[in-house]
Amino acid sequence: MMSLSPEEIERYARHLVLREIGGPGQQKLKSARVLVIGAGGLGAPLLQYLAAAGVGVIAIVDNDTVSLSNLQRQIIHDTKGIGRPKVESAREAIGRLNPHVRVEPHALRLTQENARALISGYDVVADGSDNFATRYLVSDACFFERKPLVTAAVGGFDASLTTLRPFEAGPDGKPNPTYRCLFPEAPPPGTAPSCEEAGILGALAGVVGAMMALEVVREIVGFGESLVGRLLLIDTLAMRLETLRYGWDPDNPLNGATSPR
């Protein structure tokens, strides 16, 4: 286990006094390798809180550049960064925040050809992408590579968040649910408006990205009850949070009753 320097002990002092994290938990964070999909609305606060928490290696996947319309919510970037690759803008911001974190930028788009190889090199994956195709691709790859996945989605004034460990069994002996147990099929094209079309409350992305970071830290350290098998729903118009339980679908194509495992 990696030891903490005197400067790190001071930096993470508020973690170290938490019984559920302490020195051993902080060392786990320092040893961890986390892959973040997207440096946008969710990725921006997620990356900042993971860096502040002392995650040793943070990888960022994003092939986009910073635009002026991003800055209403993507707070890891700034006005001077407009036109720059998001992975580079985010890497520099993380360096200013915590020089003890190593950033691995991947300025690319995830595909069927590269997803599994990329995901295999990390301990936990956090998906802040903005489309169903990428969410299915990432969740399938995490299943086959046996990597925990924290995944969230935001739109307008609403959001959802869950954690997936479908390569393991739950307390009842059944497999944990997959993303395809929760959402068997993507909505037909055109029925789910994009962020550009529907708009999004900027602060909502900040709240959910921070919650994603909390779940990633939980997966690394191992405290409390995770969101495996639970979907957190956030409605900011009513300022209401609900948690729905969902279970394994024996007909799902990944770890279903008839699927090859």
Image (cartoon, rainbow, N blue to C red):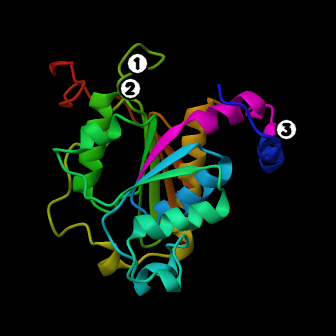
Which quadrant: the N terminus? top right
Query: How much space separates mark 3 and mark 2, taking CA atoms?
Result: 33 Å
Label located before the other in sequence (3 or 2): 3
Q: Nearer the viewer, residue 224 or 32?
A: 32
Q: Name the residue beneath numbered marker 3.
A: 17
The amino acid beneath tag 2 is Asn
Q: Is residue 258 above or below residue 210?
A: above
Question: Crowdedness of circle 1 by 10 Å Cα count: few (<14), some, many (20+)?
Answer: few
Question: Crowdedness of circle 3 by 10 Å Cα count: few (<14), some, many (20+)?
Answer: few
Q: Can you give x and y, in whole percent of width and height, for residue 206 in the image?
A: 56, 66
Q: Can you give x and y, in whole percent of width and height, for residue 136 in the image?
A: 25, 46
SS for tag 1?
loop
Task: State the mark number for residue 39.
Answer: none
Relative to 85, 224 lies left or right: right
Task: State the mark number for residue 176.
Answer: 2
Marks 2 and 1 close (CB-CB < 8 Å) = yes
Q: Can you give x and y, in whole percent of width and height, for residue 114 in the image?
A: 21, 45
The residue drawn where x is 66% and y is 56% is 98
SS for tag 3?
loop
The amino acid beneath tag 3 is Val
Query: How much space separates mark 1 and mark 3, taking CA atoms?
Result: 33 Å
Label located before the other in sequence (1 or 3): 3
Relative to 189, 97 lies left or right: right
Q: Name the residue beneath numbered marker 1.
A: 169
Can residue 228 be seen in the rendering of this structure?
Answer: yes
Magenta part of the chain: 16-36
Q: Nearer the viewer, mark 3 or mark 2?
A: 3
SS for tag 2?
loop
Q: Nearer the viewer, mark 1 or mark 3?
A: 3
Relative to 150, 14 lies left or right: right
Query: How much space separates mark 2 and mark 1, taking CA atoms?
Result: 5 Å
